[in-house]
Image (cartoon, helix red, strand yellow):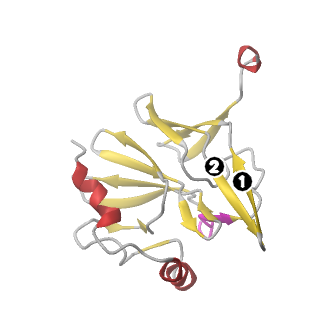
Amino acid sequence: ALTNSFFLLDILRRPMNWADRMQVIERSPLYRMSSLWPSGWGRGIIPIQKQAISMTRRGQQILYFGGDIGNGVYSRCVFMFDFPKSTWNILFPTRMGASCAESGPPEQDSTYPAARAAAAAAPFSDRDSLYFGGSRASINGSSTEYRVFNDLWIFRTASGEWQNVPPSADSQA
């Protein structure tokens, strides 16, 4: 069972200030064997800590999508944590060298959602998950542009692929 102890991941250490967060981003890739998580919280490809992630439970596993990395940088990665094995794995992107991070205006790619924070998430079918909406801010000098997403995506856990669900004609009303 998923317990509140998982949420200790974000509050066990002192809160990071923006300077600390940016040093972490600058000196490390967005996924690696990370020392940011408390010891004992798994091994494998471990995500860095983020704000406003979206999580869904899949039996003894959770999927961990997106999030606000800080300073206008957002994640589009999907990680999986397996509780019995205490392991992390990255499910998207699977291409070597592909980046998890995105900043500025969202990329327009129809094969996967733009990086974002605070998407609504729900389990779908036996192994897949639904993600709706979310938001992000693009920082350009002294101005900030906010974007709220109104899209629906299915993440296929077995293949690591995304499927966009277009709105139906009935939903346009």
Nearer to me, 111 or 38: 38
Task: State the separation of the CA atoms marked 1 and 2.
Answer: 7 Å
Dominant SS type (magenta) = loop
Point out the tag, 1 or 2, that comes first from the N-terminus: 2
Question: Which amino acid type is marked by label 1?
Answer: Tyr
The quarter of the picture where residue 36 lies is: bottom left
Q: Which residues are magenta?
A: 96-102
Q: Is residue 11 left or right of residue 142?
A: left
Check whether the beta carbons of the residues at disc 1 and disc 2 lie within 8 A of each other: yes
Mark seen at residue 71: none
Nearer to me, 47 or 95: 47
Relative vertical location of residue 27 with respect to residue 104 in this rendering, above or below: below
Question: Which amino acid type is marked by label 2?
Answer: Ser
Sort mark 2 into few (<14), some (14-19) or many (20+) by Cα contacts within 10 Å.
some
Q: Nearer the viewer, mark 1 or mark 2?
A: 1
The quarter of the picture where residue 155 lies is: top right
Q: Position of residue 114 (x, y in %)?
A: 67, 51
Q: Position of residue 159 (x, y in %)?
A: 52, 44
Q: Judging from the image, what secondary structure is the residue with disc 1 in?
A: strand
Q: Is residue 95 left or right of residue 42?
A: right
User: Disc count in the image?
Assistant: 2
Q: Which residue corresponds to mark 2?
A: 135
Sort mark 1 into few (<14), some (14-19) or many (20+) by Cα contacts within 10 Å.
few
Q: Which residue corresponds to mark 1?
A: 146
Which residue: 71% across, 25% down?
167
Q: Position of residue 87 (x, y in %)?
A: 30, 61
